[in-house]
Image: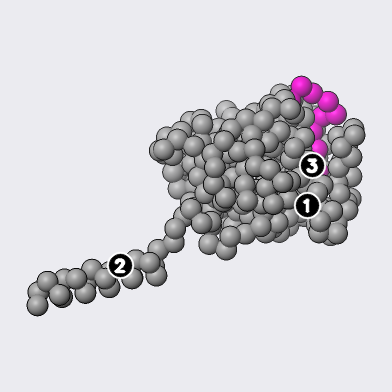
Amino acid sequence: MIIRHLLALAVLLSILSLIGCKDSSTGPGDNPPSSSMIPVPASTYQMGRFGVAQPVHTVNLDAFSIGKYEVTQVEYEALMGYNPSCFDGDYKPVECVSWSDALAYCNQLSINEGLTPCYDLSDWSCNWTANGYRLPTEAEWEYAARGATNTPDYLYAGSDIVDDVAWYGGNNSPSGTKVVGQLQPNGIGTFDMSGNVWEWCWDWYSTNYYYSSPLDNPTGPTSGSGRVVRGGGWYHNASPCQVAHRSHYTLSDSLHHIGFRLCRTAE
């Protein structure tokens, strides 16, 4: 009798665990397309942070929308016909994509959805009035990562505690990328803007640009040797996960710790 009761209890607990738990390998709940976009209102904010990315300066941004998640492998493969990633997993972020690969993805997704592509891939120019998908500018990326506010002025995207919001070198055992959307979102509902993979931005990188950049909608210098990446990733320590941290890679680099997130100009 006691054994039968114990067996029944074990079966019940197993059923409850199946009902109440989600297998994180299947995706972040709604199994989103990366075109699940979060609207970000036009606003003015203070970009940068003393000791990390100077100078702190005022930026005015028009409204835009940004991806709720990093572009995932299942989305990339469905659209482009192959998966370049080193860390296999449908709902892990795509990586080993170059900056130019990311632009090609944006254009193809725009065409598939009947939107006007933003990029001329022959000369890497951007039509900022087009309604298609593109990479965020560095200023847009930082504003979205901050949760579209300077108050509170979190160190990471949604928290002052890196483990709340970011997969990075200190918490991602076994080492590698993780399924998107598993940690806490920031204030506007985006996930993984700190950690998991670095994210390509549009801008050429310059250490001096923000000392004399335009006040309104800065898009970076006109040339450079590398394109901006933001957010840090699984491969590095916590410091690059800070919302104001800046780094860069050449536009042809396709590395196992760099992916991207979509953006669109508001219509």
- Residue 64 among magenta residues: no
Q: Residues within 10 Å of mark 3 (few under 14, many from 20)?
A: some
What residue sits right under mark 3 in the picture? Answer: 104
Q: Residues within 10 Å of mark 1 (few under 14, many from 20)?
A: many
| Residue 188 shown left or right of residue 6 in the figure | right
| Residue 112 shown left or right of residue 149 in the figure | right
Element at badge 1? Answer: helix
Q: Residues within 10 Å of mark 2 (few under 14, many from 20)?
A: few
Report the front residue among 148 and 185.
Answer: 185
Element at badge 2? Answer: helix
Q: CA distance from mark 2 to mark 1?
A: 42 Å
Q: Which colour assignment does the render follow?
A: one colour
What residue sits right under mark 2 in the picture? Answer: 14
Mark earlier in primary sequence (2, 1): 2
Q: Quadrant of residue 216?
A: top right
Q: Position of residue 44 (x, y in %)?
A: 73, 49
Q: CA distance from mark 3 to mark 1?
A: 9 Å
Q: Which residues are magenta?
A: 217-226
Q: Give the residue type that dot 1 points to.
A: Leu
Q: CA distance from mark 3 to mark 2?
A: 46 Å
Q: Quadrant of residue 267?
A: bottom right
Say if residue 49 shows up in the picture: no
Mark earlier in primary sequence (3, 1): 3
Report the front residue among 169 and 240.
Answer: 169
Q: Give the residue type that dot 3 points to.
A: Ala
Q: Position of residue 113 (x, y in %)?
A: 81, 59
What residue sits right under mark 1 in the picture? Answer: 109
> Could you tell me if the residues under marks 2 and 1 are in contact, i.e. CB atoms within 8 Å?
no
